[in-house]
Image: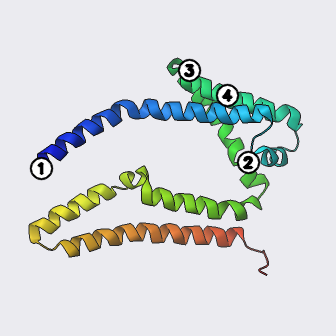
Amino acid sequence: MGAFFDYLDGIISAQMWRFGVPVLRVGLVVMFIWFGALKLAGTSPALDLITRTVYWFDPKIFVPVLGCWEIAIGVCLAVPALTRAGILLLALQMPGTFLPLILLPQVWRFALPGLGNVWMVMVKATALISVIQLPELMRNADIAARAVRLPFTFFFAASLIYLGITVVSMWGQQRAEAWANRGVRRA
């Protein structure tokens, strides 16, 4: 039975390796073109934040230019020969993405709880777990448990490591929220 699952895992991994980057590219293309089009149409949910952050430019000019910029990023990422140009456009846009957190520090108070929740979801349910080697950790715990016939001990140790990651993440989130809420009166 184990040989079958290894074979199946090999097939799935090969397909993910083959189609993973193109699917990611398509997702980024759709995202940039969609949000750029929303800015051109004047219906972007970030419109108010943009106009408050970049207050020194006329929003009637700046927001459509930003929309065209994002569409250009999407188009460049859609065409493999233009990927480097798209990455350059994206790199030039990234400082502007974080500008509200610098120019409007009161935004931190409202952004951090949501960002913390997204982080915890990523830790629990996405590829971030693969990056920190949780599947490998559980596999090693399984091998060790079978070798010495102490499954509870090894799986408990593995779960403590995972719990440690979440506790450190929650502690960091609480510290960041406390920093962002300094000077704010509680009702």
The span from disc 2 to disc 4 (Cα, nearest Å) is 20 Å
- Badge 1 or badge 4: first in the primary sequence: 1
- Badge 2 or badge 3: first in the primary sequence: 3
Q: Quadrant of the C terminus?
A: bottom right
Viewer-nearest of labels 1 and 2?
1
Helix, strand or loop under label 1: loop
In the image: residue 56, left or right of residue 126: right
- Give me the residue at 77% from left, 31% from top: 40
The span from disc 2 to disc 3 (Cα, nearest Å) is 27 Å
Q: Which residue is mark 2?
A: 99
The residue most toward the top is: 81
Q: Badge 1, how many Cα within 10 Å: few under 14, some, many 20+?
A: few
Q: Badge 2, how many Cα within 10 Å: few under 14, some, many 20+?
A: some
The span from disc 4 to disc 3 (Cα, nearest Å) is 13 Å
The disc at residue 82 is 3
Viewer-nearest of labels 2 and 4?
4
Residue 43: quadrant of the picture: top right
The span from disc 1 to disc 3 (Cα, nearest Å) is 46 Å
Could you tell me residue 93's position as x and y percent?
A: 68, 37
- Badge 1 or badge 2: first in the primary sequence: 1
Could you tell me residue 72's position as x and y percent?
A: 66, 25
Could you tell me residue 159's position as x and y percent?
A: 33, 70
- Badge 4 or badge 3: first in the primary sequence: 4
Viewer-nearest of labels 4 and 3?
4
Helix, strand or loop under label 3: helix
Amino acid type of the residue tagged 2 in the rendering: Leu
Amino acid type of the residue tagged 3 in the rendering: Leu
Q: Which residue is mark 1?
A: 1
The residue most toward the bottom is: 187
